[in-house]
Image (cartoon, coloured by chain):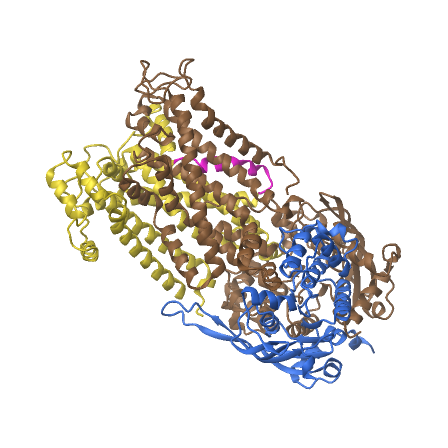
Amino acid sequence: MSRRLIPASGKVRAGLIIVAFFLLLAAFGPMVAQHSPTASGPHLLQPPSAEHWMGTTQLGQDVFAQFAHGARISLAVGLIAAVVAKIISILVGVIGGYFRGLTDEALYILTAVFLVIPAMPLLIVLTGYLPSRGVESVAVVIAITSWAGSARVLRAQTLSLRRRDFVEAARATGESRWRIITSEIMPNELPLIASGFLFSVIAAILAEAGLSFLGLGSLTTTSWGSMLYFAQSSQAFLFGAWWWFVPPGLAIALIGAGLALINFGVDEYANPRLRTGKKRRDRSKGRRAQALTVAGSGLAAAETVPAGSGSAEEVAGASTSAGGRIGESALTDSGDDLDTAPAAIRHNPVAGEPVIEVRDLNVEYPTEHGVVHAVQDVSVTLHRGEILGLAGESGSGKSTLTNTITRLLRSPARVTGGSVLYHRHAGREPIDVLTLSAPALRAFRWAEISVVFQSAMNALNPVLTVYAQFDDVLRVHRPRMSARERMALARTMLEKVGIDPDRVRSYPHELSGGMKQRVAIAIALVLDPDIIIMDEPTTALDLLVQREVLDQIMSLRDEFGFAIIFTTHDLALLLEIADSVAVMRSGRLVEYGPALDVYRAPGHPYTRMLLQSLADLGAKL
Amino acid sequence: MRYLLRKLVLYAFIAWAAVTMNFLIPRLMPGDPVTLLVDRVQGQVDPAAVEALREAFGLSDANILRQYIDYLGSLFSGDLGLSITFYPVPVADVVSGAMPWTIGLIGVTTVIGFVIGTGLGVLLAWRRGSWTDGFLPGLTFLNAIPYFWMALVLVMIFAVNLGWFPVSGAHTPGLRPGWNGEFITSVLWHALLPAITIVLASFANWVIGMRNMMVTVLGEDYVTMAEAKGLPERTVMVRYAARNAILPSITGFALSLGTVVGGSMLTEVIFNYPGVGYTLFQAVKNQDFPLMQGMFLYISVAVIIANLIADVVYVFLDPRTRQEA
Amino acid sequence: MNDDVILEARNLVKEFRTGTGVGPRGAARTFRAVDDVSLELRPGKVTALVGQSGSGKSTVARLMAQLYPLTSGEIRLDGQPTAATRGRAFTRYCGSVQMILQDPFSSLNPLHRVSHVLGRALRIHGNAGADVTEASLRLLERVNLTPPERYLDRFPHELSGGERQRVSFARALAATPRVLLADEPVSMLDVTIRKEMLDLLDRLRRESQLAVLYITHDLGSAEAYSDETLVMYRGKVVERGSSRALISDPQHEYTQRLLAAAPDPRRRLP
């Protein structure tokens, strides 16, 4: 299955080395030890020496022998308890999550009971009553008190997986329930089960240590916890006998850290998507599932999201597509001229005063497969009051272009050439947005360029009221405004986009999709900017709502006179509403000109192909 | 408010489950442990204490339902039986004497640990990809240290070797408890090292959890939009990212509470701190089962209440749960 | 006329429960997602079901695939009423009626290779023959994934959106169905690929005389690719008729508004 057998990450390697060390110690340590862990000797409380590698206890017992035996017991308890706890949690979590209904309700409540009732006191009472305390019985009792956390996480994951299309598709194919659970759902939970297992081992080792420390551990054996118990009860720390109690605690912490480090690599192994380094496209779903993981368990310290990936949304889109996907349309249809045909550029398609000038812009992403030129030598000019339509299919580079203009491009993407000039007033020297300092950039943002994001569902902060999201902009950009003026302005803006001004007190979840998008537009307008970037503002909306929002945008443009860069994959829509149209394909501008000209006489074969496809699909053209 | 109501019902059920478990455990464990136990302690303690033990378990011939009803009845009148260790002091009195110390020490330090850890998690996530990521392996190490071991090491270094802090106790011996400056100073002074221990041992857990949540939230569109709005970095980080990322952390806080409290109780043993953990240790040593069970009930109820508080805070922080639907 | 109907939905009603239904205040309410919908699918014919999100059109497809139990109504396969949501009867039903889902990025299990996906589908319906690989290769060829050997060992994340959707088609064909329920099969794809996919669907329909239910939110493609069109609004069918007639002369106000809302560059022309 896996292509990389050697773990790439240094963290994972360090974790494996630590854990392997202790496993070897547990296996061979007791054989190497020259003393029995319980035999007392003549040398009392001696520091480490050649005779006693790790010193002796107050009774003259060899600490190394105890430490090595302790490794066996602690690891055995950890592994047995984790296996038992995992089996219980898989049964409860997966069955509850998949079958729903009353079974689920009952299992959910059972899980909640074990989750909330504190494990340690329960453990103490349970072990206290155990007639004989062997290693196995202690381990099983620990498992009984500790399965609930991961059962809850697994239930949440199963719930989210069973709603996924591939499970529905498997059902529609005729797969049996049993096979769907074992072959479709559970393999996807493997990383979760594995990381849960690692953390269960840590938790069980800690629990055993705690019990033994209280004198409630296995009565017949030496464990790290019981070493600490004796060290504590004979006041070892008063005599400075660090060699007695430091090693066991340190060993527990090291194993814990080692297992946590291994967990960093678990995801990578179990998940073929991550193996080749490509990111998933429907990342929101994935993230949400991961969020549940973290939310569901305090122990789920797994670093499920690779560092820096929060910023990499665009990269993901651009690199998968530019790396491999764009070939698709070119290969299957009308031939090679798409790549070789000269770009059909009609510069300055609209008369007027420029407000944004993009000149010879180049943006690159380094990926595993080499550098991707997400934007190549693109020059466009946006004039005051103009609607510039930016069309292109997924991965064409249009979002990279707009994100460069707003300086929202995240690493590892970098601008390798060109400039974005902003003309504040006619006749004045333009400023290059790409070289603005951080404070200047903050002042520039929203006041001159604002953004309407594709999905308003995610663009509004769910925990703040609509007013608060107007208010923070005004406080920063209009510090002299009074609270009353800010409120009045927010209400006015809502009215402008056709929303009841009293909605200013609403939270985003209380608004419909179309309303959220209008609110987002109202917030974008609040500082009366020169330019609004609209990144597929209507794609997520139903046709009728889309039409209403478009009409609203057009009438606001007439009223306020801002210029718009409107990105979408819907060329027909752009041809209807835009003044000029730019078509991008694999990072290049292939067509640029007045909308009417592009509509009547598309100059590039790719544009013609897009229009032909639209016509074949029944669009009105 | 329906959300809270449902939670309330759930917690009431959990409390009932804890009470019932407490009743059933001694009766369901294999090999009639109660009789065994009574035999075990016989001769070691006051015969009157053995009699008290018999009584505490309702070791009568009445049927189990009758026993259960009697148990619930005495529970409601606050009667948890008599402690063997401190015979003839009632369990309820022993526990209520220990409870304030524990709430003062563990309650306060847990919250401090959570606040510090969450704050650091926010910062680490914000600076992800920079040198601060180097702290992560160290934090996972810290997270896996047993609380009581951390206490042992700190006591040896700071109390025994350096003599900066008192080695044990909750206040200077012989001091009469009261609301006077001397006593309060002594209490705070004695609480300092245990408090540092618990904070050190617990905060890493919150750092790691919060950092992961933050990294997820930082990818959301509303954070990008906040940045595009030209808001100061602090506002984006706190009002937009952390404000959303903390929601699952609150749930996590409630859930980890049991673990944290369990771990913290053991540190009391090291410091001979007269709280619930230390008393529990005494109970275990003396096989004082009525006391152990009483402790279990009290701690469970305390954790359930803490969970309820966390839920109230959650409702306060997340408007979506306030929806009247 | 009625005797060549393969799959027939009669007065389908589906209600979903909202609210938990547990506890004193969790009173369950019901939401009627599909309200009295009837339709017939015939061999070699495409029926389009058009509506906005939340109109209930996807639920109709899932009801007809027997993925959800009906609240009331009846589904008839070859004139026989069938109600089989599990077990062997359900598997047999799947052998005749297959479904294609909207999102090619989530409708394939990320952990299974193409060979596994097709192999399972072939085995379940006893169409594997002597050589599963051989049968899988033939399926891939039918959906224009050529050379097929190149695709057999790939994971979904190594395929483009269009390629994944082709694999979904191949998986459905593995059952040798007579009815294909396609739930917005192209709406997540780029425009140029949409056309290829619909052309593929059209070819498969002709080759195997499939009865196709084509679900879409786009009246334009319904006109271009279907024989009959039904327009759904809030769970009800508000208009039905031959596709061409319905779109050139819509009767219901809702259909008229939908048509008027579609982007139309011709409005700009002087």
Residue A233 picture quarter: top left
Residue C111 lies, with reference to residue B173, above or below; the image says below
Q: Where's the C terminus of chain A, which quadrant?
A: bottom right
Q: Is residue B60 left or right of residue B19?
A: left
Q: Is residue C148 left or right of residue B71?
A: right
The residue located at (71%, 60%) in the rendering is: C170
Residue A591 picture quarter: bottom right
Q: Residue furthest front?
A: C130
**Residue A602 picture location, percent across and down:** 86, 66
**Residue C64 picture location, percent across and down:** 60, 72
Q: Is residue C71 magenta?
A: no
Q: Which chain is brown?
A: A
Residue A542 picture quarter: bottom right
Q: Main secondary structure of the magenta part?
A: helix
The residue located at (19%, 49%) in the rendering is: B80
Q: Which chain is blue?
A: C
Q: Nearer the viewer, residue C95 or B84?
A: C95
Magenta-tinted stretch: B128-146
Q: Which chain is yellow?
A: B
Q: Is residue A500 left or right of residue A337?
A: left
**Residue A254 picture location, percent across and down:** 47, 32
**Residue A124 picture location, percent across and down:** 30, 41
The residue located at (56%, 38%) in the rendering is: B133
